[in-house]
Image (cartoon, rainbow, N blue to C red):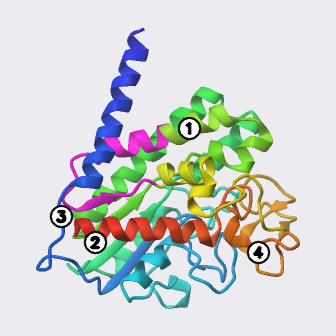
Amino acid sequence: MAANWMRRTFVAAACASAALLAACGSSSTESAISPQRFIAFGDGLADVGQKGSSYTINDGSINNWMLRISSNYGGTLKPVSAGGLSYAQGNARVTATPDAAGNAATPTVTQQIDQFLAANKFADTDLVMLSAGVSDIIAGMAAVQAGTLTEEQYVAAAGKAGQELAAQVRRLSDAGAKHILMTGTYDLSRTPWAKAIKKESLISSASRRFNDDLLVNIVDMGKTVLYVDVAYYVNLFEGSPGGYGFTDSSTPVCTSVDAGPGIGIGAGEVNSALCTTATLLPNANPDRFLFADKVYITPAAHREFGNYAYDRLRNRW
């Protein structure tokens, strides 16, 4: 009973944290930010083509929510590999290695921030964007399946990763970042992956724990941090697809099977980083699908979330 009460209190605090971080401050004509640089860190939800493609349909469109934000401001966001300031890379975890696909060479989110701070300083007109957690949830589930983590240890590890992401957010703020836009993971129990392996309840618990621990540890950072809730929006997209223009919220639209480890959910699975307009289900309209592969969302879903995040930014700063 005591443990349940403490958990309910913790969740209530996390919800209050999200509301506070989303609501603090307001924009005005005099104070509204016009970002001069867009800087990004994160995993596959944030990757804008670090290795030449993104974790969605690579169709030449504005196919990532961070790209949508920079475009709406009239700016650009390019990966570091193309001379830009997006350090995000698919499969990256917050601090742990190897990545979700077993590659120890993928920079963690912490290492991405190390790389930026080693050569750069923040300016008052920078917009820093950060998104992580998806890869940690995937990697932890793989460990459960392999028998190297218990289910309880998995959920606890997800919480620890959320705390570690909070520490990196604080690090960015302490280093001078004045405008940090961030999100955690969406509820991966809503994905075709979770449903296929029949672990929805466990993956939901891990996803929530990551976000809860993240939020509780950044609750005092409302001056420099704006949290946008991707979990809430993907839940809406999946649960009420028609309201957002989707007709299929359960089937991956891509057919680009990866014989290797791909996105970390196993060999021989669809990997949206390999997906183009030539590798879609026959006669499919990709704008009507929520999922590109069993984990990652389509450009249409990215744009919907990006527009929401942009509106929140304009209301806040």
Above/below status of 186 relative to 31 = above
For disc 1, the marked residue is: 206
Mark 3: amino acid:
Ser
Does the CB distance between marks 3 and 4 fall below 8 Å? no
Which region shows up in magenta? 209-229
Q: Which residue is mark 3?
A: 26
Q: Is residue 139 visible?
A: no
Residue 125 visible here? yes
* Quadrant for the N terminus in the image: top left
For residue 273, above or below residue 11: below
**What residue type is disc 2 on?**
Arg
Disc nearest the viewer among 2 and 1: 2
Going from N to C along the chain, the mark reached first, 4 or 1, is 1
Q: Give the residue drawn at x 75%, y 52%.
A: 265
Residue 6 % position (x, y): 36, 20
Of the two numbered discs 1 and 3 on the same chain, state the one appearing first in sequence: 3
Location of the C terminus (image quadrant): bottom left
Q: Which mark is residue 275?
A: 4
